Image (spheres, grey):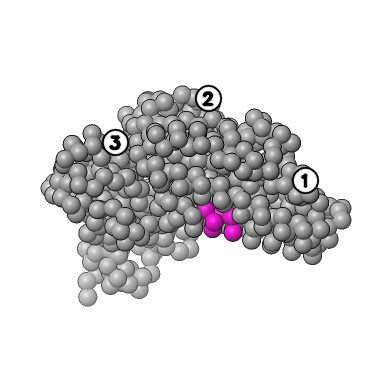
Amino acid sequence: MIKNSIGEIESQVLWNRLISVVEEQAQTLIRTAFSTAAREAGDISAGVFDRRGRMVAQAVTGTPGHVNSMARAVGHFLDEFPIDTLKPGDALITNDPWKGTGHLFDLTVVTPTFHRGKAVALFACTTHVVDIGGIGQSPAGKQVFHEGLQIPIMHLAREGRMNEDLLRIVRANVREPVQVAGDIYGLAACNDTGSARLVEMMQEFDLADLEELSDIIITRSRQAMADAIAKLPRGSWTSCMTIDGFEAPVELVGTLTIESDIIRVDYTGTSGISSFAINCPLCYTDAYTAFGVKCAVAPWIPNNAGTLDSVVVTAPENCIVNALHPAAVYSRSIIGHMLPDIIFGCLDQALPETMPAEGTSSLWNLSLVAAHGLTGRADEIRTPFNVTTFHSGGAGARPRIDGLSATPFPSGVRNVPVEVTESITPVVIWRKELRVDSGGAGKFRGGLGQVMEVSNREGSPMGIYHRFERVRFAPRGRAGGKDGALGRLRLQSGKELSEKGFYVVPAGDRLIVEMPGGGGYGAPTERERDLVQRDVDYGFITASEAEQIYGLKKS
């Protein structure tokens, strides 16, 4: 039992208020951001930290990769700039992949909060910017130096004055200076809002600092995780998965060990570092591993330092999930998003009939560009643009229910509405629909992928940075369920494209993207006949699949 001066009721009231503070912090970023990644997809994170750099609370809005890696990142900021050296109006920034959230396109800003003349907390936030220079949004980089501008941990603002030298360097190195600089100001505003609301809370409840409250929240979360882990069987289980990779297929191997109050995950046996930008820094591996564990073990417990400390992640240096500097890491999400499926594969052995089948997992974002030198000469391009529009395939079926269609698990980002993309670029989306027969068959069917047909309505060439997975190795079914459909990328004119690289779509042609479906769960013959007929009626599966795989005779 925690002994403190904050009572049970007051601690719950303060906790609820703290959640409101960080959610308003996150919404400020979404309302002020320039890029579609933040304002439409919610590809951000926001949270409040105590003086020791421990995450106390996170906003509901955001992605696990950003939130959980940001939770570790604040410690790196404090190593460089101890909290008592900071002043009111200061703000710090970095995009260091190994001290931030995994690649250069993520900017993390940390801001101290002052109350009664003392730094009492820190607010941190992250967003994915549309461009950071270098080779662009491509998995083809060979070193991090190819991938764009690197910002070591430094001041974004000093005592309320923005670091204009830094902002000038950023604007000079990116293809979309207005969007990127706008997002930086959005990050700063986001933390300022959090700080203002926290001070209001502390004044209202007459709190001199946050130390006692943070101890209560973190200690209780840690104990709740320990209690949940204590109910699990003891032992070690190993799961492996083969994915497409770049120059060669990648083997992901994870061994999960359940101890009395800690879960350890070790990735010994995983493929070595890639020569291309699909490598994953350990901070991002840690983030999605912890997320996978928490989803399966205790999703109801608040996510903070106490929860995250319950999962210990290790991996050999310079394997693909622990890439060291100067490895190219832009497309680290390709690897990181697969890790919850590795966790579920381990826990399926420890806790049978509780884990979902594999899903598409890795996002199928369309990163589209038109620019001189990239897609043609300046006189061939009427409107230059650089946009990322977020989309996804199907999720795996669950032990008692079908998988979700076109759903970005585990990232949690929202699909970007086609109207938004069309309103800010000359891109037109001719078709966006669920992909029939893509969900893996089973007692419970995998979620469907989607089909998109895209072109440049101005008749100019446009490029796509493609970095897709599940094109060669499908999401696997579980417990007798069938695999989901493989993804596919092609042109309307007939040319088949590889799953990773950069390709220029010729003027007048269209890009057709067919996203994978999730794996099925259980034998297809066990699926209820009414559900099979419903899927045919709704156009989720064809009549021929209903007959050949599910055994439903045509009426």
Give the labeled residue for mark 2.
317
Q: Position of residue 372 (x, y in %)?
A: 23, 37
> Is residue 145 visible in this depiction of the protein?
yes
Element type at mark 2? loop
Front position among marks 1 and 3: 1
Q: Which residues are magenta?
A: 24-29
Give percent across and percent down for residue 24: 59, 59
Within 10 angstroms of label 1, few (less than 14), some, or many (20 or more) residues? few
Q: What's under tag 2, amino acid-wise?
A: Glu
Q: Nearer the viewer, residue 416 or 395?
A: 416
Query: Residue 431: percent from the left, percent from the top?
Result: 24, 60
Real-space CA distance between mark 1 and mark 3, rounded to the nearest whole angstrom: 52 Å
Q: CA distance from mark 2 to mark 1?
A: 44 Å
Residue shown at the point (41%, 60%) measured from the top left: 404
Relative side of 90 to 484, left or right: right
Please indicate, yes or no, whether residue 294 appears anywhere in the rendered image. no
Q: Decide: marks 2, 3 in contact (CB < 8 A)?
A: no
Along the viewing direction, whichever of 44 and 231 lies nearer the viewer:
44
- Looking at the picture, does residue 379 appear above or below residue 358? above
Residue at the image position 19 percent from the left and 43 percent from the top: 381
Q: Is residue 227 left or right of residue 522?
A: right
Counting residues from the N terminus, which is met first, the one under dot 1 or under dot 3? 1
Relative to residue 270, is residue 237 drawn left or right? right
By secondary structure, the bulk of the magenta-drawn segment is best described as helix
Residue 501 image label: 3
Residues under numbered marks 1 and 3 in contact, where contact means CB atoms less than 8 Å apart: no
